């Protein structure tokens, strides 16, 4: 009997690009095809089988974004734009004067009216790799349990920068590869042959599994974000810098035993332009892919 395949959506969080849109490391043209890392994510998602792409952006750079990236997505797949607005809050809460947006959980919630099917959520400015897109797509396309989420798990060694320390979520899993916790380490680097969190001194290992914020969700997440956001709002009404991040929401749901999260280990190498010096390494990696026959039809 043929398995029913869910329609699937890729949700790309790009609203955080707003304040940096001119110097814009996120829209730097890289590799032999002079495309952004976001173009590569769109390409990989479409080839993995995603049916729709939803961009979360800010109105302040809507036109520029559509010109730089949106047109490319529109040429390949159904494309939708929605906006993370500082004054549109869960529970119709009144806006508060703030210095920063409300964080990635609020950004995802902003797409609630446009997503009614299983979806994955990614950052706009990271390269996640084809293997990760295929595994995540295939999982959400066949998953019938709305309370079973997923997370792409990367080898720590495949996510480090040669040019400085990085922040990573170290995952622990049970015997069935379901997530039990994520520990945020904000200053991971190498000291000789040793990888460690330089803040705590904890020694880490190349094969440790880390989260790069590549999540698979069902639409029930939107209601859970709303509940947690209302509580967060009241606790942080006088802290204009406080943000509610999606890993915190998921971690709370795991603690409540409201959801489980399957970690899908990927062989893909993650990379991004964390430091200016990373640009050369990214260009070399993209050039190598081209030599292997990958992405050769991305066009100019």
Image (cartoon, rainbow, N blue to C red):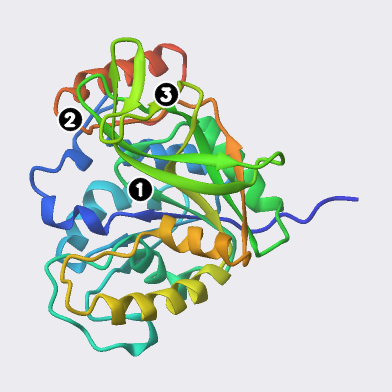
Circle 1 Cα neighbour tier, 10 Å, few/some/many (<14 / 14–19 / ≥20): many
Question: Which of the 4 quarters of the picture holds residue 100?
Answer: bottom left
- In front of the other: 200 or 182: 200
Look at discs 1 and 2 and give the one toward the viewer. 2
Give the x, y percent position of residue 257. Answer: 63, 64
Q: Are marks 2 and 3 in contact (CB under 8 Å)?
A: no
Give the x, y percent position of residue 99. Answer: 11, 68
Query: Which label sits on residue 158?
Result: 3
Circle 3 Cα neighbour tier, 10 Å, few/some/many (<14 / 14–19 / ≥20): some
Disc 2, SS: loop
Q: CA distance from mark 1 to mark 3?
A: 17 Å
Q: Mark 1 = which residue?
A: 123
Look at discs 1 and 3 and give the one toward the viewer. 3
Which badge, 1 or 2, is on the more N-terminal residue? 1
Q: CA distance from mark 1 to mark 2?
A: 17 Å
Q: Are marks 1 and 2 in contact (CB under 8 Å)?
A: no
Q: Is residue 261 visible?
A: yes
Give the x, y percent position of residue 191. Answer: 27, 16
Give the x, y percent position of residue 211. Answer: 45, 41
- In front of the other: 47 or 166: 166
Circle 2 Cα neighbour tier, 10 Å, few/some/many (<14 / 14–19 / ≥20): some
Q: Mark 2 = which residue?
A: 275
- In front of the other: 137 or 34: 137
Query: Which label sits on residue 247?
Result: none
Disc 3, SS: helix
């Amino acid at each position: 009997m043929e398995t029913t395949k869910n329609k699937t959506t890729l949700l790309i969080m790009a609203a955080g690009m707003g304040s940096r849109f001119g110097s814009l490391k996120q829209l730097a043209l890289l590799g032999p095809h002079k495309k952004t890392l976001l173009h590569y994510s769109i390409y990989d998602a479409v080839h993995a089988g995603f049916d729709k792409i939803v961009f979360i952006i800010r109105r302040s750079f809507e036109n520029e974004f559509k010109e730089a990236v949106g047109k490319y997505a529109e040429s390949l797949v159904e494309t939708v734009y929605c906006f993370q607005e500082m004054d549109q809050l869960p529970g119709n809460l009144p806006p508060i004067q703030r210095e920063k947006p409300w964080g990635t959980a609020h950004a995802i919630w902003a797409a609630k009216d446009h997503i009614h099917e299983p979806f994955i959520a990614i950052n706009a400015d990271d390269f996640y790799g084809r293997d990760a897109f295929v595994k995540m797509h295939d999982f959400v396309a066949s998953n019938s349990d709305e309370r079973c989420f997923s997370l792409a798990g990367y080898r720590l060694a495949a996510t480090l920068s040669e040019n400085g320390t990085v922040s990573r979520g170290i995952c622990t899993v049970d015997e069935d590869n379901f997530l039990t916790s994520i520990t945020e380490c904000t200053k991971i680097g190498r000291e000789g042959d040793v990888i460690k969190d330089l803040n705590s001194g904890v020694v880490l290992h190349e094969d440790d599994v880390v989260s790069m914020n590549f999540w698979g969700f069902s639409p029930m997440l939107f209601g859970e974000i709303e509940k947690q956001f209302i509580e967060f709002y009241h606790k942080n009404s006088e802290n204009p810098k406080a943000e509610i991040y999606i890993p915190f929401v998921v971690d709370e749901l795991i603690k409540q035993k409201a959801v489980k999260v399957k970690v899908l280990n990927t062989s893909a190498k993650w990379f991004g332009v964390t430091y200016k010096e990373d640009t050369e390494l990214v260009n070399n990696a993209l050039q190598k892919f081209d030599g292997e026959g990958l992405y050769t039809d991305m066009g100019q």
